[in-house]
Amino acid sequence: MALSYKTRKRLSILILVLGLPGYIVVAVSLMNWLYPDPMNKPSILVELGIYVGLGLLWALPLKRVFLGIGQADPDAQDNTAPTRGSDDRDP
């Protein structure tokens, strides 16, 4: 089932405002659960690699939602409307 542009835009905003901060809390909690003792933590490069991997992992299943969100609405009736400040008059 294909989502409309408007639905994908609203869903992407919801994901970025609520879902991503929630995912960050889960990722940090997961790291604290795996390494509860500060003296037993992995090296900074391993920890950075884990955070980078988790940072990229959230986007893979949601890639289809974010495709084309920055583009003009393909479902709009008139995509050829002049931009603000432009005019079609000859000089």
Image: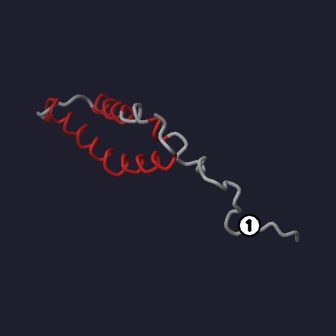
In this picture, is 88 found above or below 80? below
Q: What is the image's colouring?
A: secondary structure
> Taking 61 as reference, is 4 left or right?
right
Q: Secondary structure at mark 1?
A: loop
Q: Residue furthest right?
A: 91
In this picture, is 60 found above or below 78? above
Question: Which of 90/50 is in front?
Answer: 90
> Taking 39 as reference, is 23 left or right?
right
Q: Amino acid at mark 1?
A: Ser
Question: Which of 13/20 is in front?
Answer: 13
Quick one: label 1, few (<14), some, or many (20+) residues within 10 Å?
Answer: few
Q: Position of residue 14 (x, y in %)?
A: 36, 50
Q: Residue furthest left?
A: 37
Residue beneath label 1, please? 86
Q: Residue at x 24, y 43 (%)?
A: 25
> Taking 22 as reference, is 17 left or right?
right
Q: Residue at x 36, y 35 (%)?
A: 58
Q: Position of residue 77 (x, y in %)?
A: 64, 54
In this picture, is 54 found above or below 9? above
Question: Which of 24/45 is in front?
Answer: 24
For the C terminus, give its image quadrant: bottom right
Q: Position of residue 55 (x, y in %)?
A: 36, 36
Q: Residue at x 35, y 30 (%)?
A: 53
Q: Residue at x 81, y 66 (%)?
A: 88
Residue 63, quarter of picture: top left
Q: Position of residue 68 (x, y in %)?
A: 55, 43
